[in-house]
Image (cartoon, grey):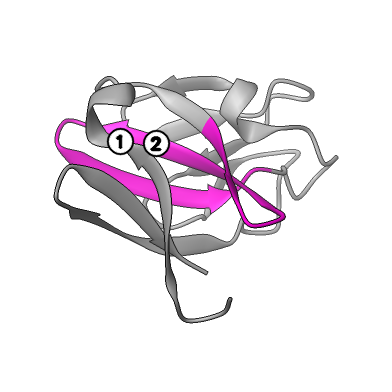
Amino acid sequence: MTGEWHFAARVVDVEPGEAIQVAVGDHSCALFRIGDEFFATDNRCTHAAAPLADGYFEGDLIECPLHQGVFNVRTGAPVCSPALKPVRTYAVRVVAGNVEIRL
């Protein structure tokens, strides 16, 4: 599965400013839409394994719903403790109205 592109969602199924959980094979990703751009990360906070797609998403920041650690969805970088370790990010592309993620 590594290096290949995989269907994640249809563009019309993700509103701007929305974060959703998607399954890519047996891998759980968080998919974020900022305007017409899409970003993907692991769906687990690096601090306490809470599902990031369930967090508060604004601008390009996602706040973990468990302990309020904050990550930049574009880079995966932690921007607020208690999150100290970056969350893994993935390449995303849009092809024929579908959002695809490369693991």
Near-viewer residue (55 or 97): 97
Q: Which residues are magenta?
A: 21-43
Q: Residue furthest bottom?
A: 3
Predominant SS along the magenta part: strand
Residue 39 part of the magenta segment: yes
Q: Is residue 4 above or below residue 35?
A: below
* Residue located at (62% from left, 58% from top): 86
* Residue 49 in picture, x, y percent from top left: 82, 41
Per the rendering, the mark at residue 10 is 1
**Residue drawn at the location 58% of the way across and 76% of the way down:** 1
Tell me the SS state at disc 1.
strand
Asked which secondary structure carries label 2, the reply is strand
Amino acid carrying label 2: it is: Phe
| Of the two numbered discs 2 and 1 in the rendering, the one whose residue sits closer to the viewer | 1
Is residue 54 depicted above or below 95 in this figure?
Answer: above
Q: Is residue 86 magenta?
A: no
Q: Which mark is residue 32?
A: 2
